[in-house]
Image (spheres, rainbow, N blue to C red):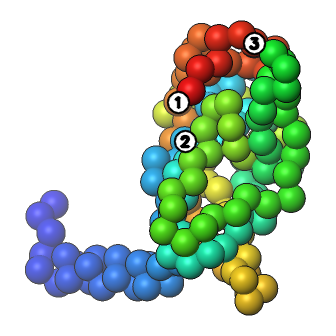
Amino acid sequence: MPKTPFSAFAFAIALLAVTAAQAQVTVQDAWVRASVPNQKATGAFMRLNAAKNTRLVSVSSPAAPLAEIHEMKMEGDVMKMREVPAIDLPAGKAVDLKPGGYHVMLMDLPKPVKEGDTVPLTLVFEGQDGKRESLEVKAQARAVSASAAPAPAAHGEHKH
Ligand SMILES: [Cu+2]
């Protein structure tokens, strides 16, 4: 059905409204690693860019009853993962959540996340004034081979 000028206009207005409400942090390339049956957890990744200093303090998703903010780090030659209370987002600096680094851990998955699924995530940011703001993003599920993204047990070949 062709778009009428009116609906195109309404759409542009809607986009403007969204942009204005969410000007503090922009999210690019949000994705979730597709899981296999019986896998209880998976990671969500994205690039965050904050206009003002802020912090990502929590994440939730209808796809998982439990979502935590995690960091992966090499300790000696072992990749370790731990929960962190928040991720600092300095003004104007892109911060990547990516395999091998910060990520959102979606836990207790009730069903597998399949390649191509759209996974909604609600990100909560806390500014320096203590004010909280939430942002909805839609992450696309992608299948990623184990060799492209090291599992926690992998070691030795992690280069920067
Ligand atoms: Cu994790």
Q: Residue at x 64, y 32 (%)?
A: 99
Which numbered circle lies on residue 155? 3
Q: Which of marks 1 and 2 is nearer the N terminus?
A: 2
- Dots 1 and 2: beta carbons under 8 Å? yes
Q: Using the numbered discs, state the Cα–Cα distance from disc 2 to disc 3 in whole angstroms.
A: 24 Å
Q: Quadrant of residue 115?
A: top right
Query: Which is in the foreground here, disc 1 or disc 3?
Result: 3
Relative to residue 148, is residue 99 drawn left or right? right
Q: Residue 118 location in percent, x, y? A: 54, 45
Q: Quadrant of the N terminus?
A: bottom left
Residue type at mark 2 is Trp
Residue identified by numbered label 1: 142
Gap in Å between the C-alphas at discs 1 and 3?
Answer: 23 Å
Q: Is mark 3 on a helix, strand or loop?
A: loop
- The residue located at (57%, 54%) in the rendering is 95
Q: Closer to the camera, 9 or 158?
A: 158
Q: Residues within 10 Å of mark 3 (few under 14, many from 20)?
A: some
Q: Mark 2 points at which residue?
A: 31
